């Protein structure tokens, strides 16, 4: 398990960095692929569920979010929502009763949970000339929290954080991960537009959203009765298992950075 995880990380991280610094279009393509794989996993999670997901609409909506923010930045989210609303209504009218309101609601939610959230990585990259470095900071901060919270939880964890959702999560791991992420992100000198205090606050924001994202994905898996969302990443599970924290930390970091830069 550890060997597989290490190999996946050694292959995945260089690919991520390569696409991040090759340019806007390459990074857009990488994020789009991650979103599509995540959406397919989300659809598979609910295959045996009583509510049927419209996989075509799910994928289409996720791609729409990516394309509109790639072309128009944050202003592209407004037309994306209108397009999604229009397509959803048409789908419901002409589906012949195959998809209930519950089905459409779950489908739209999935597209927003994964597609809308992760498309904020594209928005972060385009914040300013430091955009790529901000993306790098968000990735590193997310990984730092995941690793430190997990490690400290194993070493010192006693009090369960959410035993009914994720029995292995502890308050000690979460608080320790929060402190370490806050301090280390504060030391990210390469995001020079922010002061040490602002970088530390960014680290705190990333840590909080990471834990929420992690618990939320655990809640989904518990609801549908699976251990992993998939098996595409050896040693890590599925795309959602690997990117669950980033799904929340990316939008959280984006709006926090924008707030800091507009002060």
Image (tube, rainbow, N blue to C red):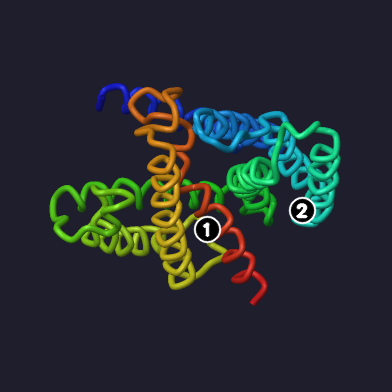
Q: Position of residue 85 (x, y in %)?
A: 80, 49
Depth check, front residue: 133 or 46: 46
Q: Position of residue 115 (x, y in %)?
A: 64, 42
User: In which quadrant is the N terminus drawn?
Assistant: top left
| Residue 92 occupies quadrant | top right
Where does label 2 land, which residue?
A: 77
Q: Residue at x 59, y 47 (%)?
A: 113
Where does label 1 land, which residue?
A: 191
Disc 1 crowd rating (10 Å Cα; few below 14, some 14-19, many 20+) is many
Instruction: Work out how far the residue at label 2 is from the one at label 1, CA to CA, in angstroms.
Output: 26 Å
Position above or below: 201 against 141: below
Q: Residue at x 83, y 51 (%)?
A: 82
Q: Position of residue 134 (x, y in %)?
A: 56, 53
Q: Position of residue 56 (x, y in %)?
A: 71, 29
Q: Residue at x 69, y 41 (%)?
A: 100
Secondary structure type for disc 2: helix
Disc 2 crowd rating (10 Å Cα; few below 14, some 14-19, many 20+) is some
């Amino acid at each position: 398990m550890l060997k597989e995880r290490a190999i996946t990380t050694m292959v995945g991280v260089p690919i991520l960095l390569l696409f991040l610094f090759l340019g806007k279009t390459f990074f857009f393509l990488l994020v789009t692929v991650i979103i599509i794989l995540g959406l397919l996993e989300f659809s598979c999670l609910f295959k045996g569920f009583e509510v049927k997901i419209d996989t075509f609409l799910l994928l289409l909506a996720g791609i729409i979010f990516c394309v509109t923010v790639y072309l128009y930045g944050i202003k592209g989210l407004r037309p994306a929502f209108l397009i999604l609303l229009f397509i959803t209504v048409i789908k419901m009218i002409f589906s012949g009763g195959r998809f209930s309101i519950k089905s459409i609601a779950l489908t739209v939610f999935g597209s927003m949970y994964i597609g809308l959230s992760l498309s904020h990585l594209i928005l972060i990259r385009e914040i300013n000339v430091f955009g790529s470095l901000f993306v790098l900071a968000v990735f590193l901060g997310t990984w730092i929290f995941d690793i430190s919270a997990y490690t400290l939880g194993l070493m010192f964890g006693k009090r369960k954080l959410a035993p009914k959702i994720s029995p292995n999560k502890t308050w000690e791991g979460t608080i320790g991960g929060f402190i370490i992420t806050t301090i280390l992100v504060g030391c990210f000198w390469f995001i020079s537009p922010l002061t040490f205090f602002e970088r530390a606050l960014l680290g705190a924001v990333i840590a909080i959203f990471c834990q929420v994202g992690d618990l939320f994905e655990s809640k989904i898996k518990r609801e549908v009765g699976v251990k992993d969302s998939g098996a595409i990443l050896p040693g890590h599970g599925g795309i959602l298992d690997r990117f669950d924290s980033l799904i929340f930390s990316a939008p959280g970091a984006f709006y926090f950075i924008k707030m800091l830069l507009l002060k």
